[in-house]
Image (cartoon, rainbow, N blue to C red):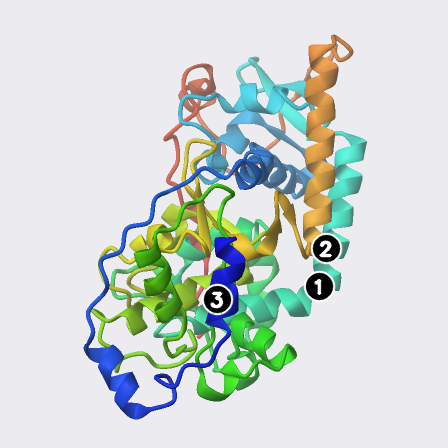
Amino acid sequence: MVFWWLLGRTRISSCVCGSKRGYEYQQKCSLVNVKLKWVKDKALDAAVAGEKDLRATCNLVSIIAAAPNFCLPIYSLLRHQGQLGLPHDLKLSTFIRKYPTIFRESHVVDSGGTCVPCFELTPEALDLYHEQLIVLKQNLKELLDRLCKLLMLTKEMTLPLQTVDQLRWDMGLPYDYYDSLIPHHLDLFSSVRLPDDRVGLKLRAWDDKLAVSQLQKNALLQQKEDMKNNCLAFPIQFTRGFGLKRKCMEWLEEWQRLPYTSPYADASHLDPRADVSEKRIVGLFHELLHLTIQKKTERKNLSNLRKPLSLPQKFTKVFERHPGIFYISKKCDTQTVVLREAYDRQQLLHKHPLTHVREKFACMMRKGLLDRSRGLLKITASANPREVVAYGNKLGDSDLHKEAGSDCDLFSEYESDEHFFDHS
């Protein structure tokens, strides 16, 4: 089998890596033009598709749980529409009503006497939310370390807050992390004004203890010989039926033997046109995906990291060139980059405690959909609509009724930049 043959060969130490002459040769070599085909992986596709709607649901749970009386009218929820990742043509109220085991609907009356849909959490969903808070508290140190490492991957130890927002679900950050987490750890983080006038999250100090990649940790634990000559090879596995031509095998074997540059090390000396530079980029995203709790993220989230990570144009081509390390799933109307080594078919090999909570939410969602399809659940409105109370900034009647049409594009996608204060 190609995988085992290749893996066995890549474990052999190469004398080329141990000599300065060999290293200079690799620096002078340009990228080898090898094209590897994309092959569908049903198991990993299922892992991605199984989380459809989960992120939006969990974020809505966090938003509602933070509200007075754990209840919010629809116009207050619409302010977060852009950050939920829902299709633009899907009304928010329609989405919420899909999951009656999570959300309970009632009505409130506004100052003009109009009935407005209002949503709260079911007791079971609220209990699960509290369980999630406990898990986050128990794993706070680990969460902070991963956020620090994420910032350490960047040139200035800084990321735009907008970029962190895009990664917060994958990183396991609380939805309101900039209010509930950052202000309590100003010894680690500060907010700064970026040259383009956006707000950025900055790590105050470098931590040498954290500057060790997962690939290096694994090599140390396994006491690999490759650690001595710094020729670390990435774990590789291909989709069943993946045909690898001999030319590609030989290229990949030699590529695996190239020197490994830590994503936390200065790489300014590397020739961006050389294979050794490409290996450094692969190592960077290998590490970044390991920092996520489910070892995957949407491709667009990685594309937005080009400038902070000082990467060349078209750097995401490494995902297509290395299908044995990364898998690109095209499920859920997007492209998701998955770290292959982290999965055994569609199951994560090592699950973060927060993943177990998310799986419980997903199970509750599936139960609600199944019960609705069987006619076991009936959505009933409150017999006595309550008078609407003040939920955030008061909106006019025109804002209130926008939900009757399209929910999308009502608010800016990242409103958090406006009230993240500079603590530096």
Which residue lies under the disc numbered 2? 353
Q: In the image shown, does 199 or 47 lie closer to the viewer?
A: 47
Where does the image place residue 318, in percent across and percent down from the top left? Answer: 33, 57
Q: Is residue 52 above or below residue 210?
A: above
Instruction: Answer left or right for 294 relative to 133.
Output: left
| Residue ID at (62%, 31%) | 72
Instruction: Answer left or right for 43 relative to 202.
Output: right
Which circle's residue, 1 or 3, is located before the other in the chain? Answer: 1
The local crowd at label 3, few if under 14, some if 14 to 19, many if 20 or more residues have their Cα within 10 Å, is many
For the residues labelled 1 and 3, the Cα–Cα distance comes to 28 Å
For the residues labelled 2 and 1, the Cα–Cα distance comes to 8 Å
Picture quadrant of residue 392 = top right
Q: Which mark is residue 139?
A: 1
Q: Amino acid at mark 3?
A: Phe
Picture quadrant of residue 269 = bottom left
Instruction: Answer left or right for 183 relative to 124.
Output: left
Question: Mark 2, mark 3: which one is toward the viewer?
Answer: 3
Which circle's residue, 2 or 1, is located before the other in the chain? Answer: 1
Residue 381 visible within the image: no
For the residues labelled 2 and 3, the Cα–Cα distance comes to 26 Å
Residue 421 visible within the image: yes
Question: Mark 1, mark 3: which one is toward the viewer?
Answer: 3
Q: Is residue 287 above or below residue 49?
A: below
Which circle's residue, 2 or 3, is located before the other in the chain? Answer: 3
Q: Amino acid at mark 2?
A: Pro
Which residue lies under the disc numbered 3? 234
